[in-house]
Amino acid sequence: QPHEFIIRYVDHGSVRGLPYVVTEYLESANLKELYNRKDDLLSEFIGNILIDSAIALMHMHDRGFMHLDFKPENVLVTRNGNVRLIDFDLSLPIEGKPVKMSNIPGTPAYMAPEQLARKPFDHRADMFAYGVAAYELLTYKKPFPAETGPEVLRLQTTRNSFLSPREHNADIPAALEKIILKCLENEPTQRYQDMSFLVRDLETVLYVK
């Protein structure tokens, strides 16, 4: 379904056996690129970016799909701060109950504990990934800095060296830190149960016209 914060689909097909997909063209950079070069665009529009990317996930969930690869690389931002969520290769339908998969592709640093532990998971895995990305964008640190799935899972479950966002950046509003920490709860039942509640709280704390 079309949405202002999701990359617009145009067409797909194949040419000489090679598949293709056509989407809207944007002059943009992804959030990882902006983050790596400490672009002023990120600091100028960070409130809008956090809200709009959460709204994009909410739209996906409302239409019955989990993204399952939410990370800064998969959020494009134009020079005037417009957001587009991209890359739906790993997306799955939201079932009536959590699903279990023996092989779960993705980026370990942004995956929820239940995914890394090969346990059943659902749309709340996207909320954990959102929390990791928001933490990183606001602090320039990863909450669980490791390279492999087992290492990330160990840090998630022990949290011996876990620091709250405001310990890295005291300028983060306490209410925003609370939102991020709720997204990063190890137990899915302790996170937001619906993206609409996350969006509501973000808009209350950050809303920028």
Image (cartoon, rainbow, N blue to C red):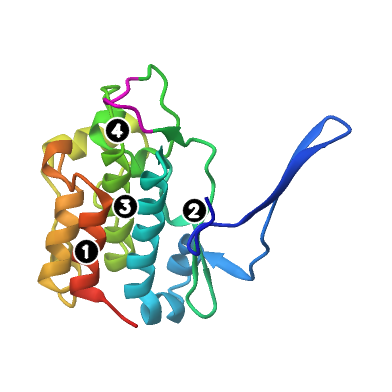
Query: Could you tell me how far apart the alpha carbons at marks 1 and 3 are, in whole angstroms?
Result: 15 Å
**Residue 45 horizontal/vertical position (percent):** 39, 78
From the viewer's perspective, tell me whether residue 82 is left or right of residue 43: right
Q: Is residue 139 magenta?
A: no
User: How busy is the neighbourhood of tag 1: few (under 14 within 10 Å), some, or many (20 plus)?
Assistant: some
Coordinates of residue 200 in the picture (x, y in percent): 22, 63
Q: CA distance from mark 3 to mark 4?
A: 14 Å
Q: Residue at x 12, y 68 (%)?
A: 175
> Contact, CB < 8 Å: mark 3 with mark 4?
no
The answer to the question of whether label 1 and label 3 lie on touching residues, with beta carbons closer than 8 A, is no
Task: Describe residue 69's horizontal placement relative to residue 175 as left or right.
Answer: right
Residue at numbered disc 3: 130
User: Mark 2 falls on what kind of element?
Assistant: helix
Dot 4 alpha-carbon crowd within 10 angstroms: few under 14, some 14 to 19, many 20 or more: many
Indicate the amino acid at tag 2: Asn
State which mark lies toward you, 1 or 4: 1
User: How many numbered markers are drawn?
Assistant: 4
Q: Nearer the viewer, mark 3 or mark 4?
A: 4
Secondary structure at numbered mark 3: helix
Q: Which residues are magenta?
A: 94-100
Looking at the image, tell me whether mark 2 or mark 1 is earlier in sequence order. 2
Residue 186 screen position, x and y as percent: 16, 39
Q: Earlier in the sequence, mark 4 or mark 2?
A: 2
Q: Nearer the viewer, residue 54 or 175?
A: 54
Q: Secondary structure at mark 1?
A: helix
Q: Which circle marks residue 200 in the picture?
A: 1
Q: Which residue is mark 2?
A: 74
Badge 1 amino acid:
Arg
Res. 122 mark: 4
